[in-house]
Image (cartoon, helix red, strand yellow):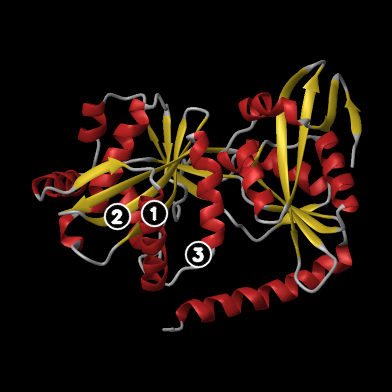
Amino acid sequence: MHFLFYYKLMIIRQIRPEEKKDFDKVVTHPLQSWEWGVFRQKTGLKVVRIGIFEGQRLVSGFQITFHKIPKTSYYIGYAPKCHAPNEAVINAFKKVGVENNCIFIKLEPNVGFSYDPNIPERPEFNQLKNFLFSQGCVYGRPLFTKYTFQIDLNKSEEDLFNNLKSKTRYNVRLALKNKVEVAEDNSQEAFEKHLELTFETAGRQKFYAHNKDYHRKMWLTLQPTRMARLMKATYQGETLVSWILFKFNNVLYYPYGASSSMHRELMASNLIMWEAIRLGKRLGCSLFDLWGSLGPKPNPKDPWFGFHRFKAGYNPQLIEFIGSFDLIIKPSAYKLFNIADSLRWKMLKIKAALPF
């Protein structure tokens, strides 16, 4: 499949393999990175990368993965954390969607601002929303949270520590006093322990986790490029907490965390977060993205409230994103899909709540 669009002074076409480095320089998130696309191809997905060029210079890029709907011939396209598209990009998406028999393509633009309670409706959001609606998009079920926490790593280490909430500072010091040790360990042995803790955590907290094959393919693809790194917190040789971090374009991300139910009183999670902040500074990152939050008015009864409160202890900035949108390619099939998808999510919630 090949296409070429001209839009004003820009050219829009598919990215070639030799343009990999340039592509990674202009995309905005690890899930838009070339290597993430390679990983998703290893899981059986088709990946299409679209570039916007000014002359010979690549100025923006988009990566779409295509997911087959079981027991049908239809697909769903997904462009997570992408740039805000213009009309020509939307037209390219529509062409790609038709050629891949998509019902819709889900867009989650990486467009966000520091949350401000005094600005209930951001004009920047409204402008982009109105454009997307005019191009055939509707609000979609979010796969990413609408909010995240971010920590500015340009501050000194002393300022960052003093900026922690008092209880969090106390817990970090307590973990140090208890001789919890945190280190980066990218060995396969450390990863397998992380995987073990991931499924222990998923069972304990009743959340959905991808299967082991997915996680192994991710690790074996991203770790050799140094995009993925593993940090672990240990006590007397036992791993209590294990995190996988992504570093991409001078931003550190915290996508995967797992912990043991043992020795929770040692506050190992508090220390590993602090050491991740220090790692980000050593790597020259300007920002640490904590990969999601509940938003400005979290419900204490929400199952993720404890995790949200844990992150909030590091006094991060709350960031609000524009949200999720479905670019509809096949309107009739889209209506049927939404009915089936609602039933699927209900079943997943029931399954997660079962004790076996």
Q: Nearer the viewer, residue 135 or 245?
A: 245
Q: Residue at x 42, y 27 (%)?
A: 285
The answer for how far apart the CA atoms under marks 2 and 1 are is 8 Å
Label 3: few (<14), some (14–19) or many (≥20) C-alpha neighbours in 10 Å? few
Label 2 environment density (alpha carbons within 10 Å; few <14, some 14–19, many ≥20) = many
Amino acid on which the number 3 mark rests in the picture: Ala
> Circles 2 and 1: CB distance less than 8 Å?
yes
For the N terminus, the quadrant is: top right
Q: Is residue 225 left or right of residue 275?
A: right
Q: CA distance from mark 1 to mark 3?
A: 11 Å
The answer for how far apart the CA atoms under marks 3 and 2 are is 17 Å
Circle 1 Cα neighbour tier, 10 Å, few/some/many (<14 / 14–19 / ≥20): some
Q: Is residue 9 left or right of residue 258?
A: right
Q: Amino acid at mark 2?
A: Val
Of residues 265 and 121, which is closer to you in this image?
265
Q: Position of residue 188 (x, y in %)?
A: 41, 49
Report the residue at 87% width, 41% height from top.
91
Outermost residue toward the left?
177
Tell me the number on the disc at residue 209.
Answer: 3
Circle 1 sits in a helix, a strand or a loop, which is it?
strand
Q: Position of residue 308 (x, y in %)?
A: 37, 55
* Viewer-nearest residue: 303 or 65: 65
* x and y percentages locating residue 47 in the rendered image: 74, 46
Indicate whether 98 appears above or below 343: above
Residue type, label 1: Gly
Write down the quadrant of residue 346 in the picture: bottom right
